[in-house]
């Protein structure tokens, strides 16, 4: 089984809808992250969490919120989806050695 | 501020050629980590290597090798005898005291048969 899982893997939604992307990990890491990837822009950090009680904004947090339900779970919500949030979303976890391990990604299309 | 630059947007080679992917970074910290990730057409991000700032020893893993030079702030990646399966986007990345992973924009490598 994969160490970092994301659900759903693909999602199509309409403008204005609220959606949630979920991430779970079995690596036992305290640190978890959400990124989005757009063509030609690499990956950009949305939110990150260093433990269950710690949530921090990344460089592009507007329009997103997160919830760290447990050490192993970190969810990303789009409260009111808009077309420019169409992207590939990655969850990642890291240990104290700073290496980040990524989930398989969620392809989101907002119509 | 931290920054990672991958100036090569796309590289195309013929199978069995050697290819080097360039990465230049900026950070004010003396302690930091550098990484390379591979993103094949299937989309997942695969961790390839981590280097800390105190370890300038070059590393070889099979057909892959990495050349870390602090004097030029570079961490270049060479694939020897490239294969079609090496076709992917490769990202260089940096973590410093901010604990944030800063990615370069990626280099798309196409290996033609």
Image: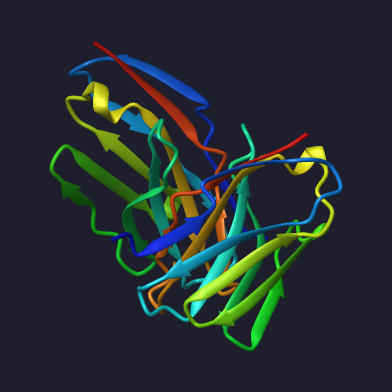
Position above or below: B31 against B23? below
In which quadrant of the rendered image does the C terminus of chain B lie?
Answer: top left
Whether residue B22 is visible: no
Residue A79: quadrant of the picture: bottom right
In the depicted view, which residue is nearer to us: A25 or B47? A25
In which quadrant of the rendered image does the N terminus of chain B lie?
Answer: bottom right
Q: Residue furthest left?
A: B62
Q: Residue at x 50, y 82 (%)?
A: A71
Q: Residue furthest bottom?
A: A53
Instruction: Report whether A43 appears left or right of A20.
Output: left
Whether residue B46 is visible: yes
Residue B20, given in percent of the width and then of the height, sits at 33, 31
Residue A97, given in percent of the width and then of the height, sits at 38, 74
Residue B86, given in percent of the width and then of the height, sits at 28, 29
Q: Residue at x 43, y 47 (%)?
A: B74
In the depicted view, which residue is nearer to us: B110 or A10? A10
Q: Residue at x 80, y 38 (%)?
A: A83
Position above or below: B8 against A33? above
- Disc tally is 0
Coloured how? Answer: rainbow
Instruction: Report whether B58 appears left or right of A102.
Output: left
In the depicted view, which residue is nearer to us: B29 or A46? A46
In the depicted view, which residue is nearer to us: B85 or A67? A67
């Amino acid at each position: 089984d994969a160490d970092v899982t994301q659900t759903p893997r693909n999602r199509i939604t309409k403008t204005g809808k609220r959606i949630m992307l979920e991430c779970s990990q079995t690596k036992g890491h305290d640190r978890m992250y959400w990124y989005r990837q757009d063509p030609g822009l690499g990956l950009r950090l949305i939110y990150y969490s260093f433990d269950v009680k710690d949530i921090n904004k990344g460089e592009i947090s507007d329009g997103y919120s997160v919830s760290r339900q447990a050490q192993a779970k970190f969810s990303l919500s789009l409260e009111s989806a808009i077309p420019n949030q169409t992207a590939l979303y990655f969850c990642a976890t890291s240990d104290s050695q700073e290496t980040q391990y990524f989930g398989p990604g969620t392809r989101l299309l907002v119509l | 501020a931290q920054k990672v630059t991958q100036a090569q947007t796309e590289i195309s080679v013929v199978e069995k050629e050697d290819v080097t992917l360039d990465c230049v970074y900026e950070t004010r910290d003396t302690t930091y980590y550098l990484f390379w990730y591979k993103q094949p057409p299937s989309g997942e991000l695969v961790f390839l290597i981590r280097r800390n700032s105190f370890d300038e020893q070059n590393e070889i893993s099979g057909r892959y090798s990495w050349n870390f030079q602090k004097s030029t702030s570079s961490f270049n990646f060479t694939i020897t005898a490239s294969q079609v399966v090496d076709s992917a986007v490769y990202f260089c990345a940096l973590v410093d005291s901010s604990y944030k992973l800063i990615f370069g924009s990626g280099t798309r490598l196409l290996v033609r048969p």
